[in-house]
Image (cartoon, rainbow, N blue to C red):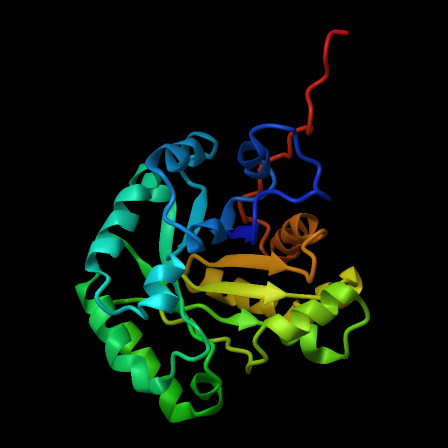
Amino acid sequence: MRLHVGCAQWTHPAWPQPSRDKLRAYATWCNAVESNTTFYATPSRSSVSSWADQTPPDFRFVVKLPQLITHERRLSGVEVELRAFLNAIEPLGSRTHVVWIQLPPSFSPNDLGTLAAFLHQAPRDHRYAVEVRHPLFFSDARTAELLERVLARVDAEWIPFDTGTLFARRPTSFAERDAWMKKPRVVRRTRALTGHPIVRYIGRDSVTETVEGWAYLVDLTVQWLFEGRSPTIFLHTPDNAESLNLARRFHAAVGAVLPDLEPLPTPLDPEPPTLF
């Protein structure tokens, strides 16, 4: 029984990491990562090959489509760009867990036809997951059902970004205030559509509040594992300084309920000892 956990990035100034091969070191702490860097541009194959070389075959990348495809072109007329992107990430092989389609808040229920056409034409040798932010997808049951139908046709997952803990009380730091301004305030989703649910959970500066807020998610993850699903859980905080430790702590919380859960790797020392 395996649970994949990770963070929004594989490097952070507050984390114990070596000066080089930061992804290799990260992969001894967590077994998944959100590939947010691909949102800004399609990476080179050589860069992607380096990512593959630094991670084991069962490591999971949730790879975000470039903003050119999702935000600028809004999934229309992007066949060439999508093909180029999928070609670029090919060196990851099985490490590409899903192609992540994060849509802008302005992508509304009126655009569901565009999403359906994009998913229908997308190559079937990849798994896809969609993150929406328009409030109607969360506040209107009929709209949510329509989106679920579109996703079900191609066995795609709906990625929720759980900001409930973040918005539970007013911000108390600059990082929390910044997150309040940028993160979506939407209703919490607990429904998995496929065998590979993904949740992006964001807490607060306070580790205690963050851990208390994820109690429901521990139970939900245990349920999914009992059902034979293969979940991936990403842990965020407003500044992400504690997210690496929190990802392992979340895994341990699930492991306390499921003793057969496969353990995470043992973290490597950030710098090996020298002879002198």
Residue at the far left: name it: 121
Nearest the eye: 229 or 203? 203
Tell me the residue at 25%/48% (across/down): 84
Pinpoint residue 115: horizontal percent, then vertical percent: 28, 74
263 sits to left or right of 158: right
Q: In which quarter of the image is residue 51?
A: top left
Pinpoint residue 145: horizontal percent, then vertical percent: 35, 86
Nearest the eye: 114 or 191? 114
Pinpoint residue 246: horizontal percent, then vertical percent: 68, 53
Tell me the residue at 72%/63% (across/down): 211
Residue at the far front: name it: 72
Pinpoint residue 146: horizontal percent, then vertical percent: 31, 85
Residue at the far right: name it: 172
Nearest the eye: 98 or 63? 63
Residue 1 visible in image: no
Tell me the residue at 80%/67% (across/down): 173
Residue at the far top: name it: 276
Q: How many labels does the image show?
A: 0
